[in-house]
Image (cartoon, rainbow, N blue to C red):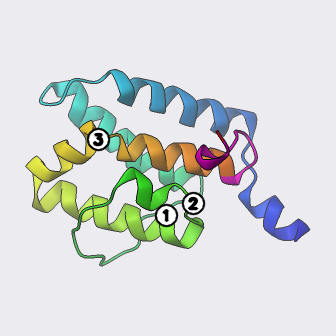
Amino acid sequence: MASTAKSLALSATETELLRDLRSRLNRVRVGTPAEAVLSGAFFKACERVDLAAEAGAAAGAVSAADVAAADMVALRTALGRLQALRTEQPAAWRATLEAGVPQAILSRRLALAGREQPVEAG
């Protein structure tokens, strides 16, 4: 159990990175140049905190509810689907961005690291 908790841990810098990115994603307007930049930053930040997208995942819809109680494996799978969605179906990616799914993934990663309360805990 201790090794699992250690592997999920985030440094103070990583925690601040995820919180700042989540805040910026909440303010971005879809269709602006900032959307493209922040979308790329989202996937790079996820890689930095051990959430590399699952390679070869098929593009598909992911909802905030899907990731609310996800473990790291499920988050990586969701990221793979979102990464494919971003390249194959940009309009669907924008809808996902507007729905707050990337923010939910960041929140769940923070919760898994013990840096924030899980969404279901209120």
Residue at x-position 25% and y-position 62% = 61
Which stretch appears magenta?
A: 112-121
Residue at x-position 70% and y-position 39% = 116
Which residue in the protein does label 3 denote?
A: 99
Tell me the number on the disc at residue 117.
none
What SS does tag 3 mark?
Answer: loop
- Name the image quarter holding residue 15: top right
Using residue 72 as the reference point, say whether residue 99 is left or right of it: left
Q: Residues within 10 Å of mark 3 (few under 14, many from 20)?
A: some
- Disc 1 marks a residue whose amino acid type is Leu
Which residue in the protein does label 2 denote?
A: 69
Q: Nearer the viewer, residue 112 or 43?
A: 112
What SS does tag 2 mark?
Answer: loop
Classify 25 as above or below 116: above
Which residue in the protein does label 1 denote?
A: 75
Classify 54 as above or below 28: below
Residue at x-position 20% and y-position 54% = 86
Using residue 21 as the reference point, say whether residue 116 is left or right of it: right
Residue 104 location (% of width, % of height):
46, 45
Q: Nearer the viewer, mark 1 or mark 3?
A: 3
Q: Is residue 115 magenta?
A: yes
- Disc 3 marks a residue whose amino acid type is Ala
Residues at marks 1 and 2, CA–CA distance in whole angstroms: 10 Å
